[in-house]
Image (cartoon, rainbow, N blue to C red):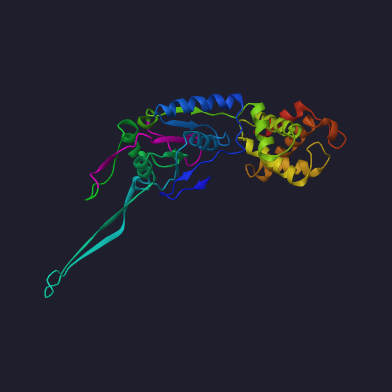
């Protein structure tokens, strides 16, 4: 992305790392149909499903400047619309008659537009990332924007109290599920003014393509990494969410070290454990989770690791998981 000089907007360039498999293309095509019809798009789903990346890709395809806005618990309406900040001072000096000096001073609040107002005025694309981290009342300004095409702002000498939304204005929302920490329930009136597209974890072909493209590992390495990740996700689905980011981390480190995942090396086990378990489990459960990771590594890399690890036992792994949960 290259920065534009108008009120913090950016010009979005295509990402070389964006992977568009048939399943992703379907979502892109649907989303673009809504956006071209001036219908807001809301991308929702678990963390790590590519919502923000997809939002940026959609904004690029609209080919107009983009404003970025990130939801925040501390947001109020002014953080979206704008506020009076500082003062504007003007002074008039009248010395038309040499012997008479007349001065007139005026001091007024200085209004500063925030990103929603700028996007509405200029016809930009607004990406409101994780918008439900903002309190619902902070987003009330969006209701009239999406329904009537009018943004209400505090009246002043320069403004009438509202502005008409530019016909090129588009908005893309992203959000995490309501169950996530720090997320607010969105008011129905706002959800009714957008089309929500639920994103789940990608299919296996897409996840392999993402890992290979984002890390530079071979397609064979990507296949093995994703196989381990997907099995771990399936086995621990009730305990935690495992996104494709874990696979990207593993691939990046292997590429950096010049390794292949089929090599017999304790380092491979360690980085798989770090990426898949991370900080989600305390010391009591971490060793049990590590054992599951080791079992899955052996399952997917039997030819290389079978001589160095105990035999893989799917039933035993399932028992470990039951004890963990």
Q: Name the image quarter holding residue 235.
A: top right
- Farthest residue to the right: give it: 307
The answer to if 168 sits in the magenta stretch is yes
Prevailing SS of the magenta stretch: loop
Q: Is residue 70 visible?
A: no
317 above or below 275? above
- The quarter of the picture where residue 97 lies is bottom left
From the viewer's side, name the closer residue of 60 and 83. Answer: 60
Q: Residue at x 24, y 43 (%)?
A: 161
Residue 6, position as x, y percentages in the image: 41, 49
Q: Hey, which residue is sitting farthest bottom in the picture? A: 99
Which quarter shows the C terminus?
top right
Specify start and end residues of the magenta stretch as a single range: 159-187
State the residue in front, 106 or 178: 106
Residue 28 appears in the rendering? yes
In the image, residue 88 lies at what x, y percent? 27, 60
Q: Residue 41, relative to residue 1: is it above or below? A: above
Magenta-drawn stretch contains 47 = no
Q: Position of residue 167 (x, y in %)?
A: 35, 34
65 sits to left or right of 165:
right
Q: Is residue 157 above or below residue 116?
A: below
Name the residue: 86% across, 37% down.
308
């Amino acid at each position: 992305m290259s920065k534009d000089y108008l009120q913090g907007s950016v010009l979005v360039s295509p990402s070389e790392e964006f992977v568009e498999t048939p399943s992703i293309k379907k979502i892109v095509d649907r989303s673009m149909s809504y956006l071209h019809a001036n219908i807001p798009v809301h991308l929702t789903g678990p963390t790590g499903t590519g919502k923000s990346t997809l939002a940026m890709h959609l904004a690029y395809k609209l080919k107009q400047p983009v404003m970025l806005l990130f939801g925040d618990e501390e947001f109020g309406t002014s953080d979206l619309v704008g506020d009076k900040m500082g003062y504007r001072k003007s002074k008039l000096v009248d010395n038309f008659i040499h012997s008479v000096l007349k001065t007139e001073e005026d001091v007024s609040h200085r209004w500063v537009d925030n990103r929603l107002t700028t996007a509405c005025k200029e016809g930009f694309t607004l990406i409101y990332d994780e918008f439900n981290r903002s309190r619902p009342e902070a987003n009330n300004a969006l209701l009239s924007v999406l329904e009537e095409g009018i943004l209400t702002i505090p009246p002043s000498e320069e403004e009438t109290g509202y502005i008409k939304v530019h016909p090129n204005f588009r908005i893309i929302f992203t959000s995490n599920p309501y169950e996530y920490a720090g997320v607010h329930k969105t008011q129905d009136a706002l959800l009714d003014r957008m089309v929500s597209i639920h994103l789940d974890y990608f299919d296996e072909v897409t996840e392999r393509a993402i890992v290979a493209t984002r890390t530079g590992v071979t397609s064979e390495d990507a296949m093995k990494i994703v196989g381990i990740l997907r099995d771990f996700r399936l086995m621990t689905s009730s305990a935690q969410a495992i996104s494709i980011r874990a696979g990207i981390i593993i691939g990046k480190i292997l590429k950096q070290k010049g390794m292949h995942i089929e090599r017999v090396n304790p380092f491979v086990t360690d980085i798989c454990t770090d990426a898949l378990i991370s900080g989600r489990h305390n010391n009591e459960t971490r060793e049990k989770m590590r054992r599951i990771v080791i079992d899955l590594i052996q399952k997917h890399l039997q030819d290389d690791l079978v001589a160095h690890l105990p035999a893989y036992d799917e039933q035993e792994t399932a028992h470990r998981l039951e004890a963990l949960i």
